[in-house]
Image (tube, helix red, strand yellow):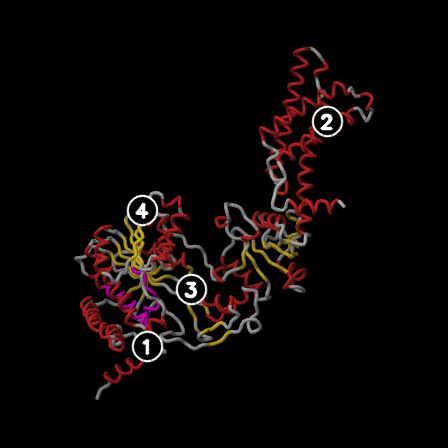
Amino acid sequence: MVEKVFRSVLDSYHHRFVSRRLILIIDLIIVAFSFSAACILRFNFALSEINWPVYKYYLLFLLVVRLGSFLVLRSYHGIVRHTSLEDMRLIFQTVSLSSLIVSVVSVLAAYAYGDIVLYIPVSILLIEYFICLFLMIASRFFVKSMYQDIARHSPRARSHAVIIYGAGQLGILTRDVLLKDTLKAYSILGFIDDNPTLINKSVAGVRVMDLETAYQKYIRENPAGIEIILAIQHISPGRKKEILEYFLQRDIVVKVVPSANEWLEGTLSSGQIRKIRIEDLLEREPIKLDSLNVQRQIGGQVVAITGAAGSIGSEIARQLLHYQPQKLLMIDQSESGLYDLEFELRNSYKNLVGTIEIVTIVASVLDEVRMRRLFSLHRPQIVFHAAAYKHVPLMERYPYESIRTNVLGTKIIADLSVQFQVDKFVFVSTDKAVNPTNVMGATKRLAEMYVQGLNSHSMYTTDFIITRFGNVLGSNGSVVPLFKKQIQAGGPITVTHPDVIRYFMTIPEACQLVLEAGAMGKGGDVFVFNMGEPVRIEDLARRMVQLSGLVVDRDIKIAYSGLRPGEKLYEELLSEDESHIPTHHPKILIARLPSVSYQETEDTIRELKRVLPTGDRDAMVALLKSIIPEYISQNSEFEKLDHLHEDLSDPV
């Protein structure tokens, strides 16, 4: 009967809260009851011995003082269903303060007027204090417990069996958040923890187990019916990967509690506990930047970013804000991308952008007149050149566009940097420029060569720095977003070749290294990033299917489409005739590239300018091959140019 009444109240107040006035009235009723009970206990249930005509004034005085304390300290303002230790502390302070006031006033009044009638017995006040304190706290936790219990068993709630990995503070917080959820009925089966001193003990009323015990007792018989939530604040990427791999190999759903800086308004909710992403499996130790050096280079400077609306350029912009440049120029030909980026920066980084002038510029790096005007007007001191075409198969079909943007666009920005005495020009290149097998990689290599050549001219004061890295997770055109779309569509996932491997970095990680390399670089340096261990694309696809809660070959098929035009099985960060030396940063190496003839590079680019208007694709690519002898096409129509070159070079 009580549960039925409470359930009807719950349905009525599911999205509403009990009136504060009602809570205040209930608290005053508890005070009256506590005082009456204290009197009865003090006189050993001999009601006739209690002087009620006098004691009713004691009660009235106590109610007035308690009411004043409630109003001043606002102990009745808390939401009962969310009662916490903070609410308990506030109730303790309120009841203690009011009891102290009543006791002091009672003693002083009796002493001042010499009338014993004005003295409220301390024994009664003491008994009343403990009864009132207990009932006020117990009433709130009783209502909270009833609300949560009935909410979890309501028709709206769905039952979920959960094991929390991590019995520390974050694990306990996760438990509390799940038990407060009224839309799902979570059953916390236990904690898993790697700390042997916690095993077989209870934390927050929940048993702590080691991994193998939890698996044997709860998971092995019903893996599909158990959710594992990883809730550990400080965990190494290696250990995190081990834990995730353990469960993924057994087709067990794993979720993770986000870091505190991702919580909405600083508060964790059950809706923020997310599924494991592929980035979690590829996560590495966090990068430690020399922030002071970067700050010295960036702080108070005018910084320009080309390709600012792209995945790399936009992340560079976000990270640059932390180093307080005087002005940030964001240049891109995508007006919608620039609009979205500016909106994000001004709303998500309000505390950083207040003193920084952010200028969004819709323009193409190929428009030399426009770029010259921008350089003349804003006088950038540091340029991050990220504008480029990067999609290998598409650029294999359109070498004209690849050459114009990747080579001529870079030349325009680099030349203007020299003319307007830019301090540093940081060129964002790619591992595909090493022993290129496609047009895109070859154009990036030619751009590298031109930048190297400019730096070799001692008359120029600009330091030209090149950064090379491989694939970045989530970037435009990367394989991860493609696989996600294919999984959402029900498959199949298309993998080009079972043996193809790639290096991966997250976008923030890659951009952090670009900033570090730009800060430490001297003119002519070519920085190569340590990309970690390579990843088989097929393994990546299989893991992404598992992370979606599906089974490879049963729910999602994997199909092999064959290597695409210009694609190779594996990427390289250095060619055979390139060496490297370490830097102070373990993830950044300096490549030693062969010397480049600036004049020869300039002549080739001039010839490319002459050939481009003809639209002769073979002539364009042949020129690239003439200046980059290591450029050997693969899976491409331009392989014929390699054979032609071989035939011409054979002795008669």
Find residue 254 and report its horizontal and vertical position in percent: 57, 60
* Local secondary structure at mark 3: strand
Seen in the picture, residue 265 relative to 469 is either above or below; the reply is above
Disc with the residue nearer the chain's start (2 vs 3): 2
* Magenta stretch encompasses residue 150: no
Q: Residues within 10 Å of mark 3 (few under 14, many from 20)?
A: many
| Mark pair 2, 4: CA separation | 66 Å
Q: Nearer the viewer, mark 1 or mark 4?
A: 4
Inspect the image, locate mark 3, and give the three-letter code of the amino acid beneath it. Answer: Phe
Q: Which residue does the numbered mark 2 point to in the structure image?
A: 35
* Local secondary structure at mark 2: helix
Q: Which residue does the numbered mark 4 point to in the structure image?
A: 357
Q: Which residues are magenta?
A: 427-452
**Quarter of the image where one finds residue 85:** top right
Inspect the image, locate mark 1, and give the three-letter code of the amino acid beneath it. Answer: Ser
Residue located farthest toward the front when viewing the structure as drawn: 12
Contact, mark 1 vs mark 3 (Cβ under 8 Å): no
Q: Which residue does the numbered mark 1 point to in the structure image?
A: 633
| Mark pair 1, 4: CA separation | 45 Å
Disc with the residue nearer the chain's start (1 vs 2): 2
